[in-house]
Image (tube, rainbow, N blue to C red):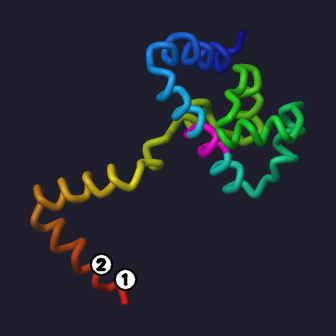
């Protein structure tokens, strides 16, 4: 068993059951969004990637939309097709919801006056 499959299976077997059903659904959606993001960055079509994975394009579409969770073997092929490490597929940090982003910004501004001034100047230069 390759290290990539081992890593992915450990994630699926150990971590996913420890979180609730709704969070698992959220992870599927985030994973699909991340896969789509990487695919588009590389200017690849869904059909091309599905062909590399040896799956039907409609099944691949279900992965990107978060309706299906790929098997460990499919994730390994996906990493190869997109030329990424498995950890890159699960990097969701930049996909925060708007309320989390606003809360983080407000907290940062309240704690750092220099940052508040800098953000204000930046905002004034980019807004019309």
Say which quadrant the C terminus sits in: bottom left
User: In the rendered view, does 100 fall on the left or right side of 114?
Assistant: right
Instruction: Specify few, some or many for label 2: CA neighbours under 10 Å numbering under 14, 14-19, or 20 or more.
Output: few
Q: Give the percent coordinates (x, y) of residue 63.
A: 71, 36
Identity of the residue drawn at 43% across and 43% down? 93
Are the residues at dot 1 and dot 2 in contact (C-beta closer than 8 Å)? yes
User: In the rendered view, does 7 fall on the left or right side of 124?
Assistant: right
Above or below, comparing residue 76 to residue 80 in the picture: above
Instruction: Specify few, some or many for label 1: CA neighbours under 10 Å numbering under 14, 14-19, or 20 or more.
Output: few
User: Regarding mark 1 in the picture, which secondary structure is present there?
Assistant: helix
Q: Quadrant of residue 77?
A: top right
| Res 6 label | none
Q: What secondary structure is the magenta-colored segment mainly?
A: helix
Q: Which of 122/26 is in front?
A: 26
Identity of the residue drawn at 22% across and 76% down? 120
* Chain part drawn in magenta: 30-35
Q: Give the percent coordinates (x, y) of residue 25.
A: 55, 30
User: In the rendered view, does 123 fall on the left or right side of 82?
Assistant: left
Q: Quadrant of residue 34?
A: top right
Distance, label 1 to label 2, CA atoms, is: 5 Å
Q: Which of 77/104 is in front?
A: 104
Q: Quadrant of residue 8?
A: top right
Q: Is residue 33 magenta?
A: yes
Q: Which of 38/65 is in front?
A: 65
Query: Which residue was labeled with disc 1?
Result: 126
Q: Give the percent coordinates (x, y) of residue 5.
A: 67, 17
Q: Give the percent coordinates (x, y) of residue 91.
A: 50, 39
Identity of the residue drawn at 74% across and 38% down? 62
| Res 123 label | 2
User: In the rendered view, does 88 fall on the left or right side of 38?
Assistant: left
């Amino acid at each position: 068993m390759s290290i990539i499959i081992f890593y992915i299976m450990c994630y699926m077997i150990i971590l996913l059951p420890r979180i609730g059903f709704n969070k698992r659904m959220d992870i599927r959606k985030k994973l699909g969004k991340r896969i789509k993001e990487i695919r588009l960055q590389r200017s690849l079509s869904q059909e091309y990637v599905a062909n590399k994975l040896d799956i039907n394009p409609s099944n691949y579409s279900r992965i990107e939309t978060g309706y299906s969770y790929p098997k460990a073997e499919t994730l390994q092929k996906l990493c190869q097709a997109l030329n990424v490490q498995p950890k890159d597929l699960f990097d969701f940090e930049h996909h925060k919801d708007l309320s989390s982003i606003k809360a983080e910004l407000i907290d940062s501004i309240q704690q750092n006056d220099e940052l508040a001034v800098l953000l204000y100047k930046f905002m004034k230069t980019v807004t019309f």
